[in-house]
Image (cartoon, grey):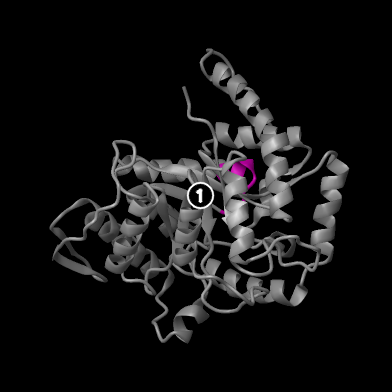
Amino acid sequence: MPAPLKFAYWVPNVSGGLVTSRIEQRTDWGYDYNRELAVLAENNGFEYALTQVRYTASYGAAYQHESTGFSLALLLATQRLKVIAAVHPGLWHPGVLAKFVASADVLSGGRAAVNVVSGWFKDEFTGLGEPWLEHDERYRRSEEFIRVLKELWTNDAAEFRGDFYRIHDFDIKPKPLSTPDRPHPEVFQGGNSTAARKLAGRVSDWYFSNGKDFDGFSEQVAEVRGYAAEHNHAVRFGLNGFVIARDTEAEARDVLREIVDKADVQAVEGFRSAVQQAGRSTSDKKGMWADSEFADLVQYNDGFRTGLIGTPEQIARRAVEYKRRGADLLLLGFLHYHEDVEYFGREVLPIIRELEKELDATAATPGPVGSFS
């Protein structure tokens, strides 16, 4: 029986919410709000939360809490939620991070995870006096970073020799918790480029896709699965989406229209200039945000593209179609987090679970497979 579709949410630990717009957002970046949100989310069907990483003010995000410390605080405030801390190779040494995550994992009963971000914001590196590597070199460094994490988490006399990191006879204790299904904390990684896809196919546990329509997501899944098969490696897939669920489709579309109409144009254009340069810096021009339009970037991970906008049933059908195409997890953002997460758990998730039963029954029956779009 296929596993149920999992759900994660973007932690709003950065000011400005999840859209770069002057629309009202009843979402707060502070700890008290986020503690309540984490408990609400784990009680409404969310298994994971992803804490964002920003080190300096940029593009409408004037304030930001550091991701690893904030993640630990949320882990200790919850009972079941798994919290993924976004981290940058080049700003962290993998041995130091491995130690921190091991402690967080033990303290939380095995619920810590990391999202390795190779880097798109050049100013964060140069402003801290760190070198800004060429695109594919950043992904080579990320691969070594992930291999060092796993080596330190699983071996008592860790050894690694690469171009960026060298570890010799190094032991960290306590080790993170280990089970047959989860031998070490899960490692997530995103990126649209060929270098990112090959990295996922070699070493990552999860591959995150930016917002994509059905065909765009299917293409990514097929390519990454091909790389994984070459390396006898198993990888699961997460997809970013921004949810606007309302009682009628017209209400949901009106909210989307208002978000875009009230966009902070200067902030969006600044973000677009930074990230499209990054996306187009790859040799095949397939990097993150390389083809994003202005409206896509108002939600800065292309979340509108996934199309989770409409009535609960419309959103549920679209979510299950993404599952049919290979999604194991949906990473979701919302406008008014407390209200929208509760609405999702109450109105959308039960329909998803019923549709999954239909999908599983169809998959078990010979014959053509239908669509849930």
Q: Residues within 10 Å of mark 1 (few under 14, many from 20)?
A: some
Residue 358 lies, in percent from the top left, at 62, 20
User: Would you identify the image quadrant in which residue 140 lies?
Assistant: bottom left
Q: Which residues are magenta?
A: 210-217
Is residue 362 visible in the rendered structure shown here?
yes
Is residue 243 visible in the rendered structure shown here?
no
Determine the residue located farthest toward the top in the rendered image: 366
Residue 359 lies, in percent from the top left, at 59, 23
Q: Which residue is under mark 1?
A: 78
Residue 179 lies, in percent from the top left, at 30, 39
Going 48% across and 86% down the picture, which residue do you hit?
Answer: 127
The image shows residue 259, relative to residue 351, as above or below, that is below
Query: Any magenta on residue 211?
Result: yes
Query: Any magenta on residue 262?
Result: no
Going 44% across and 60% down the picture, which residue do you hit?
Answer: 72
Task: Check the picture and name the quadrant holding the C terminus.
Answer: top right
Residue 135 lies, in percent from the top left, at 43, 69
Q: Nearer the viewer, residue 198 or 35?
A: 35
Q: Amino acid at mark 1?
A: Thr
- Side of 127 relative to 313 (left or right): left
